[in-house]
Image (spheres, rainbow, N blue to C red):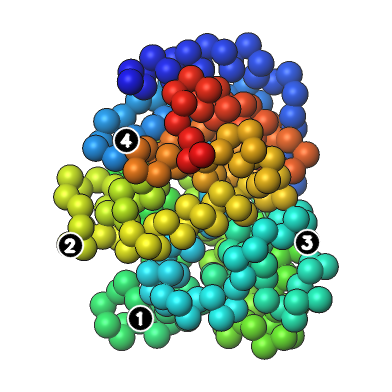
C-alpha cells in the first residue's frame, strides 16, 4: 500500500473543510490563538516506513494524548499494582467530571479521564521520589524529567514542555485541583497535591508534532518493542506485549472521552485524543498514526482529526474489526 498517496489524498480532502466547524480550545490563551486552519497527519509502520502530509511537522500541545504515555510509564514501573486505585471502564461522563468519583469512593473509572490521569501522576511522583522504576536505583528524581526522558527516547529527539501552557494550566486548572483534593480526601493520593498537579499540568504542556507522536507511540503496533529499534522481543521491549495490547484496549474503550463508543463504531481503531487537537491512533501489528487539527467537537475531540481517521480507514480498509 502506498501510504504517502493515501495521506496526500486525505490532506487534499480535509483542507477545504478547515475552519468551517468546531471550536479551538479557549480555556487558556496559548491554545485559543492556535489557527483553526491547521491540519497534519503522519504515520509510521511497524517496520519503520513513514509518511506525512500537511502540517505534520508543526509542534502542538499534546494535552491528554500524554495520558497514554504516563499510563505506559506507570504500567512499566508498577505492573498490576497500578490497578488497585484506577479502573478500566469507560466513564460515559466528560473528561473533567467530578460526580462519579463521589459514588466510587475516589477510584477513577479509567486512566484517561482527568481523575485517572491525576492518580497515575501521583504514582509516577512516588516512583521518581523514591528513585524507583526507570531511573538509577535509589536516587530521587522529578517525575517531570521522567516523562520528558521517555518521550525523547521514544521519539528519537529532544522533546520539551511549553512553559506558557504549563503556567496557564496551573492558573486555570481549578477542576483538576478539586479532583486531586477530592481523591486525597478518600486516601487515594499519596503525595502532596501540589506535586501531583505540577506533574499533570506539565504533561499536558508537552509539545510534539504528528511525526514525533506517530513515532513515539510505535511500541503499540510492535508488541511493546521500542519504536525506533529494528529488533523485537524482550531485549527491545519498552513494555511487554501484553501491556501494549492492554493500552490499545483502553484507548479503544476510553481514549476519546465520552465519545469512545461512537469512535469505535465509526473508525474502529484504538485512539487517544487531546484538547490541543491531536489524536494518536493504532492499527495493531501494522502502524501508528497521528492526526492534528485544533478545532474540536462537543466532546473535546478534533473534529477533522476524527474525519481524517475515518477517511484513512475507508481508504485502507485497516481496522481492528
Ligand atoms: O486537564 C485539562 O482539563 C486540560 N489540560 C485538558 C486535557 C485534555 O486534553 C482533555 N482530557 N482528557
In the picture shown, does residue 95 fall above or below 54? below
Decide which of 212, 262 is in the foreground and name it.
262
User: How far, Cα to Cα, is label 2 from label 1?
Assistant: 20 Å
User: How far, Cα to Cα, is label 2 from label 4?
Assistant: 20 Å
- The mark closer to the camera, 4 or 3, is 4
**Residue 221: image location, x then y, percent:** 36, 46
Left-right relation of 263 to 317: right
Mark 2 vs 4, N-terminal side: 4
- The mark closer to the camera, 2 or 1, is 2
Q: Residue at x 39, y 25 (%)?
A: 52
Residue at the spot of label 3: 97
In the picture shown, does residue 86 fall above or below 5? below
Q: Are marks 3 and 1 in contact (CB under 8 Å)?
A: no
Question: Mark 4: few, some, or many residues within 10 Å (few <14, many ≥20)?
Answer: many
> Which image quarter holds the N terminus?
top left
Mark 1 vs 4, N-terminal side: 4
Q: Residue at x 32, y 56 (%)?
A: 224
Element type at marker 4?
A: strand
Element type at marker 2?
A: helix
**Residue 119: image location, x then y, percent:** 59, 73
Mark 3 vs 1, N-terminal side: 3
Residue at the spot of label 2: 235
Residue at the spot of label 1: 132
Residue at the spot of label 4: 45
Residue 78 position by quadrant: bottom left
Q: Are marks 2 and 3 in contact (CB under 8 Å)?
A: no
Mark 2 vs 3, N-terminal side: 3
Residue 43 visible in the displayed image: yes
Mark 4 vs 3, N-terminal side: 4
User: How far, Cα to Cα, is label 2 from label 3?
Assistant: 41 Å
Amino acid at each position: 500500500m502506498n501510504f504517502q498517496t493515501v495521506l496526500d489524498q486525505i490532506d487534499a480532502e480535509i483542507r477545504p473543510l478547515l475552519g468551517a466547524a468546531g471550536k479551538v480550545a479557549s480555556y487558556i490563551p496559548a491554545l485559543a490563538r492556535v489557527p483553526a486552519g491547521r491540519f497534519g497527519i503522519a504515520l509510521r509502520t511497524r517496520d519503520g516506513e513513514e509518511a506525512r502530509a500537511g502540517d505534520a511537522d508543526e509542534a502542538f500541545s499534546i494535552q491528554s494524548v500524554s495520558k497514554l504515555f504516563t499510563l505506559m510509564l506507570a504500567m512499566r514501573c508498577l505492573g498490576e499494582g497500578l490497578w488497585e486505585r484506577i479502573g478500566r471502564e469507560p466513564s460515559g461522563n466528560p473528561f473533567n467530571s467530578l460526580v462519579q468519583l463521589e459514588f466510587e469512593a475516589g477510584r477513577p473509572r479509567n486512566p484517561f479521564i482527568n481523575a485517572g490521569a491525576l492518580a497515575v501522576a501521583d504514582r509516577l511522583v512516588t516512583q521518581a521520589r523514591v528513585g524507583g522504576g526507570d531511573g538509577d536505583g535509589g536516587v530521587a528524581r522529578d517525575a517531570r524529567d521522567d516523562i520528558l526522558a521517555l518521550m525523547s527516547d521514544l521519539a528519537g529527539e529532544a522533546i520539551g514542555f511549553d512553559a506558557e501552557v504549563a503556567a496557564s494550566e496551573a492558573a486555570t486548572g481549578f477542576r483538576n485541583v478539586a479532583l486531586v483534593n477530592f481523591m486525597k480526601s478518600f486516601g487515594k493520593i499519596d503525595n502532596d497535591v501540589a506535586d501531583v498537579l505540577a506533574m499533570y499540568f506539565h504533561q499536558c504542556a508537552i509539545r510534539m508534532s504528528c511525526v514525533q507522536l506517530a513515532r513515539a507511540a510505535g511500541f503499540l503496533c510492535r508488541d511493546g518493542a521500542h519504536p525506533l529499534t529494528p529488533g523485537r522481543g524482550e531485549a527491545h521491549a519498552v513494555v511487554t506485549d501484553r501491556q501494549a495490547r492492554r493500552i490499545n484496549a483502553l484507548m479503544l474503550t476510553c481514549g476519546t472521552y465520552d465519545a469512545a463508543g461512537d469512535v469505535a463504531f465509526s473508525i474502529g481503531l484504538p485512539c487517544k485524543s487531546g484538547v490541543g487537537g491531536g489524536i494518536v491512533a493504532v492499527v495493531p501489528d501494522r502502524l501508528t498514526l497521528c492526526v492534528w487539527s485544533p478545532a474540536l467537537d462537543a466532546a473535546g475531540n478534533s473534529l477533522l482529526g476524527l474525519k481524517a481517521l475515518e477517511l484513512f480507514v475507508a481508504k485502507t480498509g485497516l481496522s481492528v474489526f
